Image: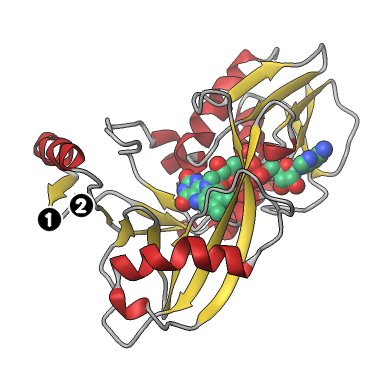
Amino acid sequence: MKVLVRGAGFAGLATCWYLLEAGHQVSLYDPKGIGGGASGVSPGLLHRYPGAKPRRADDSATRTLLNIAGPNSHTPKPILRLPQSPEQETHFRTLATRYDDLSYENGLLIHSALTVHPLPYLNGLWSACLARGATYGEAPAHLEVLAIGAASDQVTPIKGQVLRLKWPDIPPLPYNLIGRKYLVMGDGWCDIGATYERNFTSPDPDLQTAKSLLLPDAVKMVPELENAPILDCRAGVRASPPGHFPPIIKQLDERRWLYTGLGSKGLLYHATFAKQLVSLLPT
Ligand SMILES: Cc1cc2nc3c(=O)[nH]c(=O)nc-3n(C[C@H](O)[C@H](O)[C@H](O)COP(=O)(O)OP(=O)(O)OC[C@H]3O[C@@H](n4cnc5c(N)ncnc54)[C@H](O)[C@@H]3O)c2cc1C
């Protein structure tokens, strides 16, 4: 069957891949190109222990797609989750005794975590789709999958901003950090994310708002960031589903299916739910 996928973010690219695996003919279209939405903005934290009281989640489908996209798509990097309450610390300590990819060292240290590089990942996955016969453009199709993120009217749009700061004259951290905000280590810089803005007037970066919402927590995590020069500010809009979870997979009419609502956990869940969507489509 010929299928047109609208939207070239994590959801759209994963859907393309699983459609091709199931034997469909696939075309992909996005007016903003590959990674032009929220996916291209994400600093790329991926780990298996999401939520305030985490249980282990299954990230195997995402890891399979990262391997297909190639070695430039991600870097192994532990994450240190700092507890935000005594109850959370107790939970983290218990969890750390249960799984061999965890330890407790001033916080929950997740050894199996990755930093995903969103654009190399998406472009690598798209190259793999092209090699399997996918095409780019609005080709006529029997079915359309709308993987359009926050452009759907069935989700709540939540703006997120990220600040890139020059790393101060101290050794780089051996892990990424998640506290009230998060810090992703780069080479001579770090990304501080992310804001959760419900009442925004523009989806574009707004440096003053980003600074006021991010810098105080960044400095609490690493005091040397106090006067760090700002290198960049970027913004994207998340698609939050009603009730926060699960993402939305829904047939809209005879020809169109909707896949959106990945919220702030797009990397963890996009592949699993794309696979599920494709299993629901006629062959
Ligand atoms: C600042 C920020 C930081 C984040 N950090 C992380 C993180 O560290 N880890 C993590 O797992 N998640 C993170 N997220 C969440 C993650 O980025 C999202 O869950 C994910 O990008 C959603 O993917 P998507 O493909 O559904 O949406 P998008 O990436 O937004 O893709 C939707 C695409 O649809 C296109 N589109 C819209 N309308 C049409 C149309 N009519 N036709 C064709 N195309 C259309 C848009 O141009 C867009 O490219 C972050 C998000 C933000 C904003």
Can the viewer see residue 68?
A: no
Marks 2 and 1 in Cβ contact (< 8 Å) = yes
Image quadrant containing the C terminus = top right
Q: Position of residue 268 (x, y in %)?
A: 44, 39
Compared with 15, 71 (above or below) is below
Q: Is residue 275 left or right of residue 89?
A: right
The residue sitting at 46% across, 63% down in the picture is 214
* Viewer-side residue, 221 vs 136: 221
Tell me the quadrant of ligand 1.
top right
Looking at the image, residue 111 lies above or below residue 163: above
Element at label 2 = strand
- Identify residue for label 2: 109
- The span from disc 2 to disc 1 (Cα, nearest Å) is 6 Å
Q: Position of residue 246 (x, y in %)?
A: 50, 23
Q: Amino acid at mark 2?
A: Leu
Q: Residue furthest right?
A: 140
Position of the N terminus, as image quadrant, is top right
Q: Which residue is mark 1?
A: 105
Position of residue 72 relative to residue 143, above or below, is below
